[in-house]
Image (tube, grey):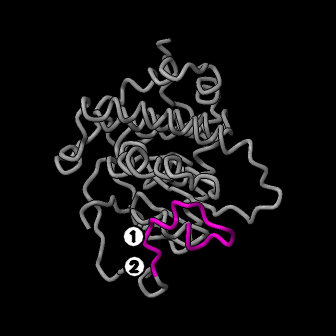
Amino acid sequence: MNHLVPARHKPIRPSLVIHRSSRHSSNLVPSSAMAAPARFVVFLVVCFIASSSVVSASDSPPKIPLALYYETLCPYCSKFIVNQLPNIFRDGLISIVDLELVPYGNAFLDSNNTISCQHGPDECLLNTVEACAISAWPDLEKHFGFILCVESLILENKHLEWESCFSKLGIDSHAVKECYDSGHGKELELQYAAKTGSLRPPHKYVPWVVVNGAPLFEDYMNFESYICRAYSGEPPEACSKLPLKKDQDMKADHSHVLHADGMVSSSATNNNQKKIKMVI
């Protein structure tokens, strides 16, 4: 399957050069096409979370867990975060969803806790930055807005400008910087490594979407239908507009073999981490 990044089961020789495959780069969205929609989506996220926070959930059925296992420089992950995941804010499904983001993906952890990332050292840095954002700002409105901004820049091929998201969103960079520079970010990534490694069945590629504890495999683009079907309460109006699949239709085809895509990995050790140089 060409649109997913398969998981690796063996470390690839580290390199300080970030490999950019033509297959991935050809899927990047031009800056002019992404900038305005991304800003609008950030606005929608803030509005929907703010409005849903005033509704009491004391008598509501449990929310449906939605987990996304991803890596920051995978363009297919970025596309899902920017173009698909915000749908739950637009149509109101966020009111019945407990969203969890796990930025680790196909990284490899060796015996001395060195992390090698599939798309090189910049991905290790951004995985850790996004992990720090989630930890520093537990509020979904804040950390998802930041991650959405960073992933939008990645789609624009401007990931080196990720720090501009602090000023764009009007948020203080100190908590994320302190998390990264103190080594706490590395600890968070080790936790995400364990969480990703404990998936059953194991993840085969990224993005890897799990709804209510069950992986969606290749059908992850229809994640909203799975959310609506799993919810035990009165579903939001948006569910009536989605195709609700039957059990037999929700089984993915796992018969094909997935091969590594030749991405070059790189290591980011605890003692030799690249320090974040804040520009704001």
Q: Which residue is mark 1?
A: 219
The vertical placement of 38 against 117, above or below, is: above
Q: Nearer the viewer, residue 34 or 186?
A: 34
In the rendered image, the residue lying farthest to the right is 58
Residue 189 in which image quadrant = top right
Q: Is residue 190 left or right of residue 69?
A: right
Residue 254 at what x, y percent from top left?
Answer: 36, 80
**Residue 280 x, y percent position in the rendering:** 50, 11
Q: In this view of the protein, can residue 151 be seen by the observer?
A: yes
Q: Residue at x 39, y 62 (%)?
A: 221
Using a 10 Å C-alpha cutoff, classify the residue at mark 1 as few (fewer than 14 neighbours), some (14 to 19) or many (20 or more). Answer: some
Three-letter code, disc 1: Asp
Q: Position of residue 197 (x, y in %)?
A: 55, 63
Cβ–Cβ below 8 Å for labels 1 and 2?
yes
Is 160 contained in the magenta span? no
- Magenta range is 228-245
Query: Looking at the image, which is closer to me, 152 or 11?
Result: 152
The amino acid type of the residue labelled 2 equals Ala
Seen as rendered, the residue at the extreme top is 280
Residue topped by disc 2: 252
Q: Image check: 257 left or right of 267?
A: left
Taking the spot 26% from the left edge, 30% from the top edge, the residue there is 31
